[in-house]
Amino acid sequence: MQGNTLKGKTALVTGSTSGIGLGIARSLAAQGANIVLNGFGDAKEIDALQTAITKEFDVQVAYHNADMSKAAEIGAMMTFAADKFGGVDILVNNAGIQHVADIENFPVEKWDAIIAINLSSAFHTTRLALPSMKAKNWGRIINIASVHGLVGSAQKSAYVAAKHGIIGFTKVTALETADTGVTCNAICPGWVLTPLVQKQVDARAEAAKISGDEAKRALLAEKQPSGEFVTPEQLGAVAVFMCSDAASQMRGVSLNVDGGWVAQ
Ligand code: NAD
């Protein structure tokens, strides 16, 4: 859906060169927000993404390649956004990675990377975005958590710990901004078919010697009662709603969009 409800605002979406982050960036741009993209990928493809969003929605789109596991690079990205657009009005903490292994076989460096990228990066972006949001008395911080912020799954210790952590961080951010025009909420998606999940589909197909489609059906059947994937566009629409005036008293909420996963 296109409109101009966010015209004049700037949205920074971490990890927006792919998947959910890209879907959310496009939805915010469709409402007129200028966008700061971030994430890894081929330079030419990222250039093309920037151009496509600029043309399709008539907004300004910048890109910063900060590694979300590095506090100094996050600082540089926030300064870049402030110089370019005068601050970040909408911050979407989305960048994330996954690794699947039993605790006793979980590589220590993977644990550290997941906690840094999926949890600590949100602390750094938030602490650096808040002063200008508070000064303008308007801001939206949207943390992309997961159903794994609400329930666990075996072999995902670091991911589940980071996602539970970001839900706690969401509540504290909401409380510290409760008497301002800044809100902070989390979205908790179930399975979304992005590169992050495709890897898990491929691993399942290989282990069970089944086709990719069978692996997708099995993955959904195990956890997601709707039997359908959530889409980045649906999550983008939820993010747009969280930016609206109607959501100005939604504070510290973790909203699951999960095909019924957590209702079980
Ligand atoms: P994805 O792999 O498609 O995208 C991840 C994005 O993060 C990419 O743009 C990637 O370049 C970026 N990224 C990864 N490491 C980075 C780093 N160190 N610094 C900067 N950027 C980095 O994954 P996705 O499925 O779109 O996941 C996005 C978020 O949604 C993650 O936080 C993930 O945990 C969460 N999530 C995904 C699902 C799902 O089913 N796909 C479900 C619930 C939550």
Image (tube, rainbow, N blue to C red):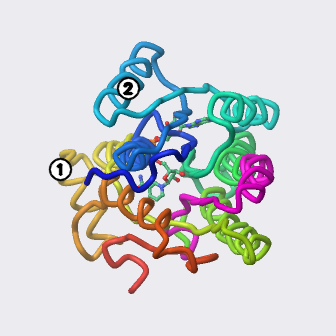
Residue that lies at the very extreme toward the bottom in this rendered image = 264
Image coords of residue 71 (percent x, y): 80, 37
**Judging from the image, what secondary structure is the residue with disc 1 in?**
helix
Give the residue at x 57% y 60%.
Answer: 142
Give the residue at x 75% y 70%.
Answer: 177
**39 sits left or right of 218 in the view:** right
Q: Is residue 95 above or below residue 137?
A: above
Magenta highlight range: 123-151
Image coords of residue 182 (percent x, y): 67, 65
Q: Which residue is mark 2?
A: 49
Give the total of numbered labels: 2
Q: Is residue 58 visible?
A: yes
Image coords of residue 22 (percent x, y): 41, 41
Res. 149 mark: none
Image coords of residue 136 (percent x, y): 71, 56
Res. 213 mark: 1
Image quadrant occupied by the N terminus:
bottom left
Judge by depth and name the residue closer to the eye, 140 or 9: 9
Answer with mark 2 or mark 1, whichever residue precedes in sequence.
Answer: 2
Judge by depth and name the residue closer to the eye, 217 or 62: 62
Judge by depth and name the residue closer to the eye, 75 or 69: 75
